Image: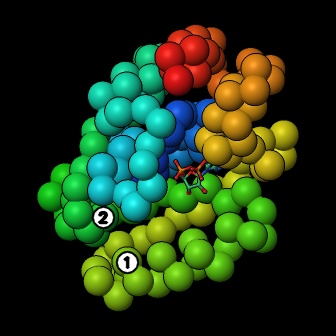
Amino acid sequence: MTRKIAIYPGSFDPITYGHIDIIKRASLLFDEVIVAVARNLGKTPLFSEEERVGMIEEAIRELPSVRVDSFNGLLVDYARSIGAQAVIRGLRAVSDFEYEFQMALVNRKLDEHMITVFLMPHEKYSYLNSSIVKELARFNGEVSCFVPPHVEKQLLEKMRKK
Ligand code: ADP
């Protein structure tokens, strides 16, 4: 039987407990989950690609079926190149829906075999995103309930240098 492989793409700038919640749920459904850091996003990230990959690596250390990678260009091309059948996306609130719906349909148009799977995080993470975490860290707000300790440490170091 073919191994079921899913990609979880995003900017992960930085990875939060919300992302980790989705990764864990996806790992229960698929043989392999690849967390894929998108390189060519319009937004300028706070963390470099290497830093983002490193923080994800540390966060998934205890999940044997999960690995991290990064990619350029179209998601469907990358998915095909590694033999993934599905794309995982997190749905936090209705506000995520329109954009995610559009992306899923475009990806299906580009590759009719590409399946998008939406997963809901625990409700305590439903208002959480990386931007909020960065904003909090910038003003010395408490972020320990939103990101793992190693991410908090890197966030604080980054803000100190800014
Ligand atoms: P962000 O929206 O925080 O910048 P990304 O671009 O890295 O995050 O998002 C990658 C995927 O993870 C998207 O599908 C996004 O909806 C999802 N996601 C981000 N934060 C959460 C969260 N707190 N709970 C569930 N899914 C999330």
Q: Residue 129 in the image: state x and y as whole percent.
A: 67, 45
Say what secondary structure mark 2 lies in.
helix
Q: Residue 130 in the image: state x and y as whole percent.
A: 62, 41
* Residue pictured at 53% horizontal, 34% vertical: 14
Kindly check if marks 1 and 2 are in contact, taking CB atoms under 8 A apart as contact.
yes
Q: Residue 49 in the image: state x and y as whole percent.
A: 32, 35
Label 1 to label 2, Cα distance in Å? Answer: 8 Å
Confirm or reject: label 2 Cβ below 8 Å from ligand 1: no
Q: Quadrant of residue 115?
A: bottom left
Q: Which residue is mark 1?
A: 107
- Residue 75 numbered mark, or none: 2
Most extreme residue toward the left is: 81
The residue under label 1 is which amino acid type? Asn
- Residue 134 numbered mark, or none: none
* Looking at the image, residue 24 lies above or below residue 123: above
Can residue 2 be seen at all in this image of the molecule? Answer: no
